[in-house]
């Protein structure tokens, strides 16, 4: 029996070494899988954010068109014309309410997507958020936004479109 014992000892040690090696391989594989899952989650999140940006960018021209349509809507006619065409003006008023409702719904949807309108009018010009398309003489301090041609938007803190604005330029009369 003493001859058999020395032979069993190396087998147990070899088995323990094999077990340790397999355990280490298993732990490495598990760590690799966890890293893979994290990378995939980050890639998926990035893909969703990109898709959101593309979707919002595609919606903005429609929003702009509706806003421009309302800005250029005919002003109310005098009372005499309104009374003669009462039915037309009633339909026109309903149309106006409907377009405003669409704009409100689009704004709400964009807000739910994380889109924020960039505030512009009355603010100091900031090239990170605004694009100056014209300067206009004014009594205001230089660089104050007087009006906005096109609204700007940001998504998750990133500007996806700057506001197109008119900025003030101190009038020459003010210095004399």
Image (cartoon, rainbow, N blue to C red):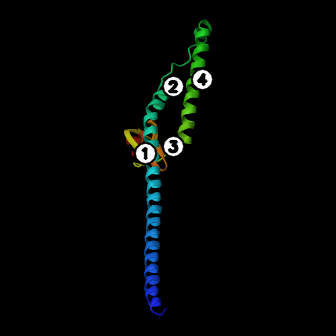
Callout 3 environment at 10 Å: few (<14), some (14 to 19), or many (20+)?
A: many
The disc, 1 or 4, on the residue closer to the chain's N-terminal end is 1
Residue at screen point 45% across, 79% down: 15
Label 2 neighbour load within 10 Å: few <14, some 14-19, many 20+ = some
Q: CA distance from mark 1 to mark 2?
A: 31 Å
Q: Nearer the viewer, residue 33 or 154?
A: 33
**What SS does tag 3 mark?**
strand
Instruction: State the CA–CA distance, disc 4 to disc 2.
Output: 10 Å
Q: Is residue 31 visible?
A: yes
Under circle 4, the secondary element is helix
Image quarter for residue 11?
bottom left
- Residue assigned mark 1: 50
Label 4 vs label 3, nearer the camera? 3
Relative to 137, residue 91 above or below = above
At label 1, counting other C-alpha atoms closer than 10 Å, the crowd grade (few under 14, some 14-19, many 20 or more) is few
**Secondary-structure class at tag 1:** helix
Q: Earlier in the sequence, mark 2 or mark 3?
A: 2
Q: Nearer the viewer, residue 35 or 100?
A: 35
- Indicate which label's residue lies in the foreground, 2 or 3: 3
Q: Which residue corresponds to mark 4?
A: 97
Q: Position of residue 22 (x, y in %)?
A: 44, 72
Give residue 115's mark. 3
């Amino acid at each position: 029996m003493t001859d058999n014992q020395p032979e069993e000892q190396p087998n147990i040690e070899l088995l323990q070494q094999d077990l340790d090696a397999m355990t280490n391989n298993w732990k490495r594989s598990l760590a690799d899988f966890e890293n893979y899952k994290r990378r995939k989650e980050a890639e998926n999140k990035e893909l969703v954010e990109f898709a959101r940006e593309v979707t919002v960018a595609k919606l903005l021209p429609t929003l702009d068109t509706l806003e421009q349509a309302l800005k250029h809507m005919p002003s109310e006619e005098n009372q005499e014309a309104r009374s003669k065409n009462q039915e037309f003006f009633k339909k026109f008023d309903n149309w106006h309410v409907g377009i405003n409702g669409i704009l409100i719904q689009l704004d709400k949807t964009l807000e739910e997507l994380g889109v924020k309108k960039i505030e512009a009018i009355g603010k100091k010009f900031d090239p990170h958020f605004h694009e100056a398309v014209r300067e206009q003489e004014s009594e205001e301090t230089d660089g104050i936004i007087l009006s906005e041609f096109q609204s700007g938007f940001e998504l998750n803190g990133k500007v996806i479109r700057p506001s197109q604005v008119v900025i003030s330029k101190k009038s020459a009369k003010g210095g004399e």
